[in-house]
Image: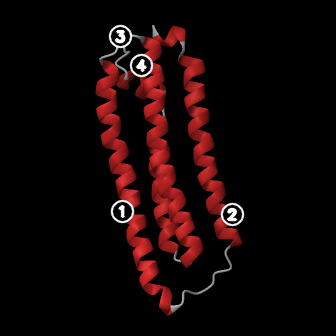
Amino acid sequence: MFTQIVSKKYLRTLAALHAVLAFGQLLFLAIALIGKNGHSVEQSQADTNRMLLLMALLMVAGSIAGGIYMRKRKVLEIRMNNNLRQKLDEYTISLIIRFALMEVASIFCIVGYLFSSHYLFVFFTLVVLVFFVVVRPTKGNVLRDLDLIV
């Protein structure tokens, strides 16, 4: 049923959305790395930098854990719906929210790097990007999540 009705167009849309969001993060990171002159951090900013690092770590962990939790909960809700169009719309919204959570954490880390020149922010950004790639929408994931396997 799903494969005949909307699979190619729907999956292309999800893949394009995912690719654009991932590319935006990579582009912003590349610009930050190239544009940063590598200024050293002043000692008076050390406390601020530690606070930013802690906030970044919490945001990364929270966005990944929150995305996993939200996805599980939302998938259970979506499966109860019998209307295919509504299932697809709700699934798309849940993916956008999940991607947005990770995007916010990634951008915060990049901005933290711009403020502090601390490469741990770049590492946090790369962790988010790797997870972002791992959770990309695939045909198998959509079929399994929406319980559409015949």
Where is residue 98 shown, x and y percent of the image? 44, 41
Report helix, strand or loop for mark 4. helix
Mark found first going from the N terminus, 4 or 1: 1
Residue 82 - label: 3
Write down the quadrant of residue 148 in the picture: top left
SS for dot 3 = loop
* Mark 2 residue crowding within 10 angstroms, few (<14) / some (14–19) / many (20+): few
Q: In x, y percent, where is residue 2?
A: 47, 12
Q: CA distance from mark 4 to mark 3?
A: 8 Å
Looking at the rendered image, the quarter that the C terminus falls into is top left
Kind of residue indicated by mark 4: Lys
Q: Is residue 52 above or below residue 28?
A: below
Q: Residue at x 37, y 21 (%)?
A: 146
Q: What numbered label is drawn on residue 87?
A: 4
Q: Earlier in the sequence, mark 4 or mark 3?
A: 3
Locate residue 126, reporting x and y percent: 50, 59
Rate crowding at label 3 as few (under 14), some (14 to 19) or many (20 or more) other CA atoms within 10 Å. few
Q: CA distance from mark 2 to mark 1?
A: 24 Å
Distance (Cα) linking label 4 and label 2: 38 Å
For residue 58, the mark is: 1
User: Which of the two discs, 2 and 3, labels the residue nearer the N terminus?
Assistant: 2
Does residue 119 appear left or right of residue 70 in this picture?
right
